Amino acid sequence: MRGLSGESEQFMSNVAVIGVQWGDEGKGKIVDLFTEHVSVVVRFQGGNNAGHTLVVGGEKTVLHLIPSGILHSGKICVIGNGVVVDPEVLCREIDQLQSKGLLSDDRQLVLSDGAHVIMPWHKRIDVLREGAMGDAKIGTTGRGIGPTYEDKVARRGVRVFDLVRPDRFRAAVERALPAANEEIVRLGGEPFEAEQVMAAYAKPAERLVRYVKDASLFVYQRIQAGDNVLFEGAQGTLLDVDHGTYPYVTSSNTVAGNAAVGSGVGPSCIGEVIGITKAYTTRVGSGPFPTELLGQVGQDLRDKGGEYGATTGRPRRCGWLDAVVIRFAARVNGLAGLAFTKMDVLTGMPTLKIAVAYELDGERVDELPTDGESLARAKPIYEEMPGWTEDLSACKRYEELPENARRYIERIEELGRVPVMAVSVGPDRAETILRRNPFVSP
């Protein structure tokens, strides 16, 4: 394509990484792996309700807001305008990284001035609402994510631009607090005083101002300069507020289309979309989950896979891999490839199952139902495949994987209609087989 200068522009080196399932697919590891080939990593949606766990050299790091590329020196990590930011959480995350000798250069982190701020009242409202819903609760993390996005859409939100300017911040707090307190009191909670809020956020604001920029302009300029950019999603496709298993979803758009909106660049700046899927399926919180395993097999997957939330510690619901979900994610995200994580967790299971379709009200359904009630009634139609017993962790090339492991992957390629470009055989960065690198010309 041609830019305004008339010179040829090539955006195919800019890649979005998206979760294919209900989140927790291992996106952080794949982002960390690909960061070697980029200059900038952009987080474009969600908040600290998401957690990415990275293992490098045996050392584990858990991130909630800062993009997973921060473990590489010299890379710039951007928190985009589509993210909702808890200033106290972000400051703690910066402290954690700096205690490990990371993020020593302020220029390595960019915080969008257009990102919305999670205020104390958002968190209190979130918890009170969930408590009031009883058995009908959504299963939120109580981090205030939903109420913050609500205020954003209602045009009464507080932005980072306001947070780091004391006069504007005071005005924003005084404008928003009466309505928030009214709801808190109605739900039986303790209201906030404006001074209380101002005092709580004064130090975080002073700490974060050094990172605040027009992130949209920054990312665009880096792309124009020829830098490779990686767009990092949080949660997964089926938690998308428009395309997920509504109402059991998150409060933002998790699909690839939001990578442009949530970072402030045009969609033509994103060349390729890579989907991340586990070799089985998990989800956290309430909502339909056709392949869920409620017995010992599900518990074995949970224990062996360490399926407990990085943010909340909540046990994840576990089930067999669902090819119907993969096909859906490939369609709504425009996937060019899949990265397969946690293959090693399946080692030792004599028989594996893949949901190839559903039975719904007596009929076979090959595509994901668009409403949650139908999905809750859907019964998976399984195809069985033999497992393997060989240790995968030493495999460096795809050909070294056991035959049955390769057959499993290749069947998913057929059913999902997307090629598998990477296979994770262990938690460490090095324990990944890369079949195709989207940043390297074939």
Image (cartoon, rainbow, N blue to C red):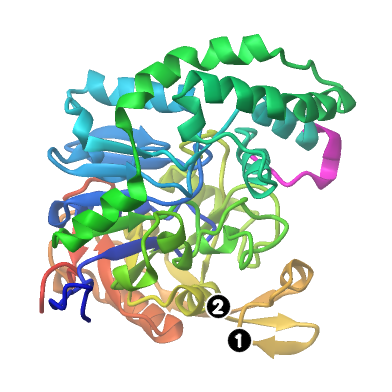
Q: Which mark is residue 324?
A: 2
Residue 392 visible: no
Q: Residue at x 86, y 28 (%)?
A: 187
Q: Residue at x 14, y 57 (%)?
A: 37
Counting from the top left corner in percent of width and height, residue 277 is at: 41, 63
Residue 133 visible: yes
Circle 1 residue: 366
Task: Name the secondary structure under disc 1.
Answer: loop
Mark 2 touches mark 1? (CB < 8 Å): yes
- Dividing the picture into quadrants, the one containing residue 264 is bottom left
Task: Name the secondary structure under disc 2.
Answer: helix
Amino acid beneath label 2: Val
Q: How many neighbours does mark 2 have within 10 angstroms: few (below 14), some (14-19), or many (20 or more)?
A: many
Structural distance between the alpha carbons of marks 2 and 1: 7 Å
Of residues 201 and 424, which is closer to you in this image?
201
Of residues 295 and 51, which is closer to you in this image?
51
Quadrant in which the C terminus appears: bottom left
Magenta stretch containing residue 140, yes or no?
yes
Q: Which mark is residue 237?
A: none
Magenta stretch containing residue 402, yes or no?
no
Viewed as shown, does residue 123 lie left or right of 77?
Answer: right
Counting from the top left corner in percent of width and height, residue 321 is at: 49, 68
Asked if 212 appears above or below 304 in the picture, the reply is above
Q: Residue at x 65, y 67 (%)?
A: 290
Amino acid beneath label 1: Asp
Q: Residue at x 36, y 34 (%)?
A: 62
Which segment is the magenta one? 131-141
Asked if 251 appears above or below 259 in the picture, the reply is above
